[in-house]
Image: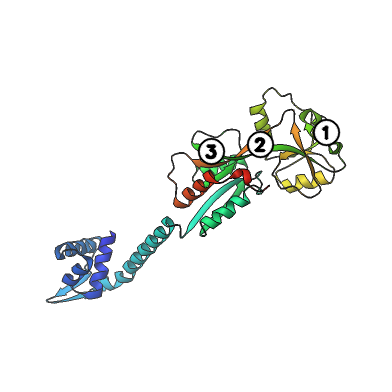
């Protein structure tokens, strides 16, 4: 069954005249008649009965009428939705965000995006880096915000901004007396391990000859709030990105010797055609002044 057959059928239902229905559909009468006959063959019975100058719906025609009206209505609705989508009257977007990326540097960008596209509807989906990568490659996400040392060849990464790593600790910790914390100063310290942190991969990629630290890992958690609550309680220290939301009372110092930074990137699938919302977000990200993003 093709949509033009449905359209011809409904036009004929309205006027019950083959000549008039052909005029309404802007086709010749033979073309309309042929399409109706083909539809009847597909449905297994006669839809219209011709009696001299009069045309009537058969019982099968009456039975099919509401179903074919529903088909036409659904087709029209789909067309309207598609046109709205192309004009950004509706702009849904699935955005994956690596769970260690804090919002502080991104809020201004989202505000600019909302001003440019008031209809934008962003669904934020958080997770570890590997999970977000898998979701991107499976087509479940339109875009992703990631901070990894390297990306698969299938993905394109557009650099947005960089952030350094810091050491977080409580006010009674010995690091409070330091302006900066050398990596070797963590030897022997009680350490709270952020399970989803990509810092070890960055360290291995940037400083492959760095000696292993003798950390006493007391607790490990995927949840940043648990780690930070333990820091506040004086249970240990942790390495974290500088723009990660920090609970009031936690002190931080830059990590040095060596210093390590990561790059936040907007990631797309290479070769995948951009939808209008994705195209708009990528264009804004490329011209947005990330140096003025709020801290």
Where is residue 41? Give x, y as percent. Answer: 22, 61
Find residue 105 and name its label: none
Alpha carbon separation for disc pair 3 and 2? 17 Å
Q: Nearer the viewer, residue 164 or 91?
A: 164
Secondary structure found at label 1:
loop
Residue of label 2: 198
Q: Is residue 237 visible?
A: yes
Residue at image location 61% in from the left, 36% down from the top: 148
27 on left or right of 161: left
Counting residues from the start of the chain, the first of labels 3 and 2 encountered is 3
Q: Nearer the viewer, residue 10 or 37?
A: 10
Q: Secondary structure at mark 2?
A: loop
Most foreground residue, 201 or 135: 201
Measured along the vertical axis of the image, is residue 188 above or below residue 75? above
Residue 163 location, quadrant: top right
Instruction: Look at the numbered disc 3 and give the secondary structure of its residue.
Output: strand
Q: CA distance from mark 1 to mark 3?
A: 36 Å
């Amino acid at each position: 069954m093709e949509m033009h057959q449905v359209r011809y059928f409904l036009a004929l239902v309205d006027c019950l005249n083959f000549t008039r229905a052909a005029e309404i559909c802007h086709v010749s009468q033979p073309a309309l008649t042929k399409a109706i006959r083909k539809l009847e063959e597909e449905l297994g019975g006669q839809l219209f009965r011709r009696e001299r100058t009069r045309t009537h719906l058969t019982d099968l025609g009456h039975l099919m009428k509401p179903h074919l009206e529903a088909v036409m209505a659904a087709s029209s609705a789909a067309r309207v939705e598609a046109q709205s989508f192309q004009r950004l009257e509706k702009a849904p977007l699935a955005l994956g965000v690596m769970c260690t990326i804090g919002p502080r540097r991104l809020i201004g960008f989202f505000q600019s995006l909302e001003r440019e596209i008031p209809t934008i509807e962003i669904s934020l989906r958080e997770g570890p880096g590997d999970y977000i990568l898998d979701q991107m490659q499976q087509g479940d996400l339109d875009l992703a915000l990631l901070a990894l040392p390297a990306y698969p060849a299938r993905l394109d990464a557009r650099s947005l901004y960089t952030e350094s790593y810091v050491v977080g600790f409580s006010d009674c910790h010995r690091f409070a007396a330091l302006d900066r914390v050398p990596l070797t100063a963590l030897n022997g310290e009680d350490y709270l391990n952020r399970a989803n942190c990509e810092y070890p991969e960055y360290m291995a990629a940037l400083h492959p000859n760095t000696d292993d630290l003798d950390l006493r890992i007391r607790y490990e958690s995927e949840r940043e709030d648990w780690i930070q609550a333990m820091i506040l309680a004086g249970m240990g220290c942790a390495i974290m990105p500088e723009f990660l939301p920090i609970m009031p009372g936690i002190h931080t110092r830059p990590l040095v010797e060596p210093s390590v930074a990561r790059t936040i990137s907007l990631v797309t699938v290479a070769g995948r055609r951009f939808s209008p919302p994705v195209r708009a977000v990528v264009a804004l990200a490329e011209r947005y002044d990330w140096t003025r993003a709020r801290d």
